[in-house]
Each structure stands twice: as structure tokens, then as C-alpha cells.
Amino acid sequence: MSSEVHSAPPTPRPVSTPPSQMHSPAPSRSPLRAMVTPLASPVRKAVASVKGYLEEVGHITRLADPHDAWLPITASQSGNSYYAAFHSLSSGIGFQALVLPAAFASLGWTWAIVCLTAAFVWQLYTLRLLVNLHEPVAGGTRYSRYMHLATTVFGEKWGKILALLPTMYLSAGTCTALIIVGGGSMKILFSIACGPACVARPLTTVEWYVVFICVAVVLSQLPNLNSIAGVSLVAGTAAVGYCTMIWAVSVAKGRVAGASHDPVKAAGDVDRTIAVLNGLGIIAFAFRGHNLVLEIQGTMPSTLKHPSHVPMWKGVKFAYLVVALCLYPVAVGGFWAYGDQMPPNGVLSALYKFHSRDVSRLVVGLATLLVVVNCLTTFQLYAMPVFDNMEAGYVHKKNRPCPWWLRAGFRTFFGAVNLLIAVAMPFLSELAGLLGGISLPVTLAYPCFMWVAIMKPPRGSAMWCVNWALGSLGMVLSFALIVGNLWGLVARGLHVHFFKPE
């Protein structure tokens, strides 16, 4: 039995040769030219049988769609559990974790810890579902892209309606947020390094955004997802480093004067409800990366003997152990140190606000540098699905690999568009709760419905009931978060300043 993967390819035109056949000798030069005759058919059958056997026992992995071998996500299938851990750590933790103490200020100690723990366990469960759904039948279809799985389950029309906006935000929107955070951190790092007596003219915020995106575009020229495994390792290491430094320094300096750990008092029940929903949205916003799980697993070889879900789950378990060891200290330590004095932008802003003078410039500068490094390197991982989609249009139309100069043009164009959005809408950080509600179904709801639709458990069974309940609860929670945060924005007002980054 062959472990060949079926991905329903479009009928390619014979314009070019897939990479998997590029090294095959030309018929005119091959000593096996006689194989085209009837006498050679037993030899051809024997070669095919040996190849099928090698695929079955796990020595060969071949894509049925030659186009997949030309696209950034599936071009290289030499991934392993280490690569999975690097990518999962990079996608699972980042600047969103620094906003978690603000959720504690809205919910209070008990409910914030309960909600954070419930969300962590829930998203780990749906992560497990996605890992198993990547190749639900051994040797069958491999879903190496989230949108492919969504359109298979919900249909072409509803798959795009339900999943396209959240996944696009989780990819392109995260890249825009990384420009805002990374460029702003570059500006702060320059002021720290230059010192109060600096005579150099500082760059404006927009100019720092340009510096950030130029470096990010240069890094983005690495060709495929496997080639950025080292970049993801740097991203994850930097995130762990600055999270640890920030909460450790905040706790070491003790509570700030006047900090209270009671939930923020609201003027009425409506305001209190809005504050709670905003806190829940921030917690949902902290968990990300589910839109990349299938893509990461698609970089691994998968055969009947060695299915890809085994090394993938090993890498995910290690990565999310590290994520938990970062999220909880940042959330608990940050709220303990700053309480209701926590700025809306999170614990890093609190560190600058309360300890910029009594903490060594070296420590603050190093933490800021790690934030910059993390933003630059995480940008590569979250941009990869967009790069893949842009190149797929060319590959399927021209039936040949995307040339290097066009690939560089695509990625430069994507960087320029994200830069324009970052400059035009620098207030995106104030929408964390709303954006968390929009992206929540991708993380907590859709995987449950996908599992029921593909695995088809018996109606009324435990798994059927659990997944329907969790999926429905996720959709209701998403709707409540979107409505509540929109209501809050209308009631409080949003400080909109287009094309005026602070």
C-alpha cells in the first residue's frame, strides 16, 4: 500500500517539470529507453512495486500534486520534532503575552487565573485535534493549510466566509502589529542607548517602522518554511528571554505605590460587563498559532510507518510547556507588581513607566532589544502563509516554480502593504479585545467542528458531545466578545489617529 498523498491537484499543463522529476535522466540519454516497449513492462512494474514498497515502509514521501513542491510551505519536507518545537514556540508566545496582566486588572485574581487556565487547556485540546486532522487517514489526504481544511469541511463558499478573515488577520494582521511593536521598540532602544545627553537627531516613529520593515523584508527572502527553523528558534528564545526579564525585574522591584489588586470598579453593570468581556478578549488574544499548525506539520515527511503527527505532537508538547512557563509568571507577576496601575499596553509599558529610572539601562535596553529581535523573527513565520498564497496564484497559472526575483517582489510588496497599514492605523493595540474575539473561532471553535465533520464519531458519543459543546461555546463566546468590545468602543470612544503614530 502506498502512502502517496492525495491533494486533488488541478490538471497541470505540460510546461515544466516538477522538482521531484528534475533529476530524472532524459529519455534520449537513458539506458532504460527500451522500457517504453512491451517487453520492458515487467521491469517497469517491478520498479513501481519497489518504489511503492519503499513508500509504504517509510523511506519515501512523495506529493501527488507537483505544485506543492514549488510552494514555500511544502517545498521542503525534511522537518522533524525539533523544527516543530521551534515553530510552535515562535508562534505560541510573543508580545500578546505582555498584555495579559491587563486582563487580570479587569477580572481579578481568581477569575483571571481560572479563565487563563481554562483557555490554555482548551486551546491545547484543539491543537491536538488539528495535529490529528492534518492527515486523518494514513496515506490519505494531507491538509497542509488551514484554509484547505476549512473549505473541505464547510464548503468553498462558507469556508472562506467563516475562516478567511480570522486567518488573514492572524497572518497579515499579526505582521502589522509586529511592525508597530517592533518599530516602537526600536525607537525606545535608540533613546536608551543614546542616553539623555544624546545630540543625534532621533528618527520619527514612521522612520523606525521603515527601518523595521526593511530588515524584516531582507530576512523574508529565505525560500520556504523549513529554511526559517533557525529563525523561529531565535524568535522563541528571544520571547522567553524578555518575558522572563520583565516579570523578574517587576517582581524584584516590588509593588508600585497605590496598586490595588481588586477588579477595576465600573460605574454600572454595563461598564462592568464590558470590562469583563474585554479581559476575556485579551486572554483569547494571547493564544495564537493555530492558523499555522497544519502548515508546520506540512513540512514533515509522512508515511504509514512514520506518520507526521507523532513528531509534530512531540514538538508541540515541549513548545507549549515552555509557553505555559512564560505566560503564567508574566500574567501573575505583572499583575502582582502593578495591579490596577497596569497600562493598557501591558507590562512592558509598565516597566518603562515605573522603573525606567531605578533599573539599569543595560537591563531595560536588553529587554527592549529582545522584543525587537522577537518581532523581526516572528514576522517571518506569520508571513509565510501569505507568501505561500501569493506564489500559489503564479504557480497554478504558469505551471512552473516562482522565479527568485518574482518571489522577492511578492515579499517586498507584502512588507510595503503592512507598513502602510501600520502607519495608517497605529491604534490597533487598543483593539486587542475585539481582535481576540474575531480570531477566537480559529483557535477554540472551528477545530471541534472540523473533527466531528471528518472523523464522524457516532452521534451522541462522548467525543461527539464534547466537540459540539466546545465548538458551540466558542462561537457564542466569540460573538459575545465582538459585541461587548464594540459596545465598549462606542461607549468609551476610540482615540483614532490615522497616519499619526505616537
Image (tube, rainbow, N blue to C red):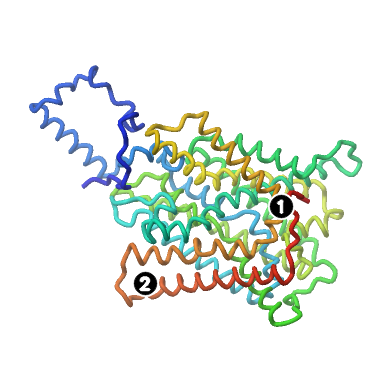
Q: Position of residue 493 (x, y in %)?
A: 74, 67
The reply to whether residue 371 is visible in this rendering is no
Q: Which tag is nearer the camera, tag 2 or tag 1?
A: 1
What element does badge 2 sit on?
Answer: helix
- Tell me the kind of residue under disc 2: Met
The dot on residue 194 is none
- Tell me the kind of residue under disc 1: Pro
- Examine the image and state in which quarter residue 496 appears: bottom right
Instruction: Using the numbered discs, state the Cα–Cα distance from disc 2 to disc 1 in whole angstroms.
Output: 43 Å
Q: Position of residue 34 (x, y in %)?
A: 14, 22
Residue matched to label 2: 463
The reply to whether residue 229 is visible in this rendering is yes
Q: Position of residue 109 (x, y in %)?
A: 68, 74
Relative placement, left or right, of 473 versus 64 is right
Observer-nearest residue: 468 or 192? 468
Dot 2 or dot 1, earlier in sequence: 1
Above or below: residue 261 compared with residue 214:
below
Residue found 39% across the figure and 61% down from its top: 154
Q: Position of residue 121 (x, y in %)?
A: 51, 67
Q: Residues within 10 Å of mark 2 (few under 14, many from 20)?
A: some
What element does badge 1 sit on?
Answer: loop
The dot on residue 426 is 1
Residue found 69% across the figure and 67% down from its top: 489
Observer-nearest residue: 119 or 205? 205
